[in-house]
Amino acid sequence: QVQLVESGGGLGQPGGSLRLSCAASGSILNINNMGWYRQGPGKERELVATITSGGSTNIADSVKGRFTISRDGAKNTVYLQMNSLKPEDTAVYYCKCNARIAVAKWKDFWGQGTQVTVSS
């Protein structure tokens, strides 16, 4: 139905930057919210940032001022710009979107996850 493909993860230096991208494709009529979540070692999955179709954002306090979320509606793509990286940002980052796949049917979809490791 809907596939989310993430890219841009990898190894980042403390204080450095990485940019994640997530492109949605498939049988999509509309996309409402898009967002990023992460799951660190031994931790539960947590919200990092979300963005609505209108551009309103919600950023977790732990990354506020360092991470920025944006989206390209024409490309069904969401981005996460991560600056001033810290070792505690190490996690698998997952993309999520809420998409309309039929006239009256909305559903949440998840990407496969991309590893971000912050280490010197």
Image (tube, rainbow, N blue to C red):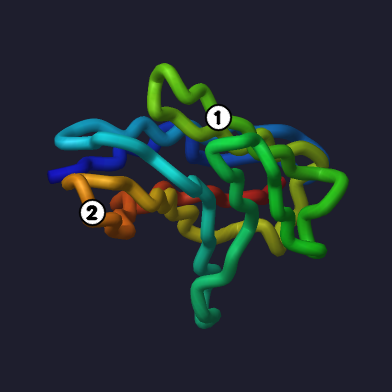
Residue labelled with disc 2: 104
Helix, strand or loop at mark 2: loop
Residue labelled with disc 1: 71
Residue 83 against residue 59 in the figure, above or below:
above
64 left or right, relative to 109:
right
In which image quadrant can residue 15 be found? top right
Are the residues flagged by discs 1 and 2 in contact, CB closer than 8 Å?
Answer: no
Residue at the image point whose x is 32% and y is 55% from the top:
110
Number of numbered markers: 2
Q: Could you tell me the amino acid type at mark 2?
A: Ala
Residue at the image point whose x is 74% and y is 43% from the top:
67
Q: Quadrant of the N terminus?
A: top left
Q: Could you tell me the amino acid type at mark 1?
A: Arg
Q: Is 88 or 97 nearer to us in this picture?
A: 97
Spatial CA span between label 1 and label 2: 24 Å
Residue at the image point whose x is 69% and y is 43% from the top:
56
Q: What label does residue 82 carry, if any?
A: none
User: Which of labels 1 and 2 is toward the front?
Assistant: 2
Badge 2: how crowded within 10 Å, few (<14), some, or many (20+)?
A: few
Q: Is 100 or 115 nearer to us in this picture?
A: 100
Residue 50 locus on image (x, y percent): 60, 51
Badge 1: how crowded within 10 Å, few (<14), some, or many (20+)?
A: many
Residue extending farthest right: 65
Helix, strand or loop at mark 1: strand
Residue 34 against residue 53 in the figure, above or below:
below
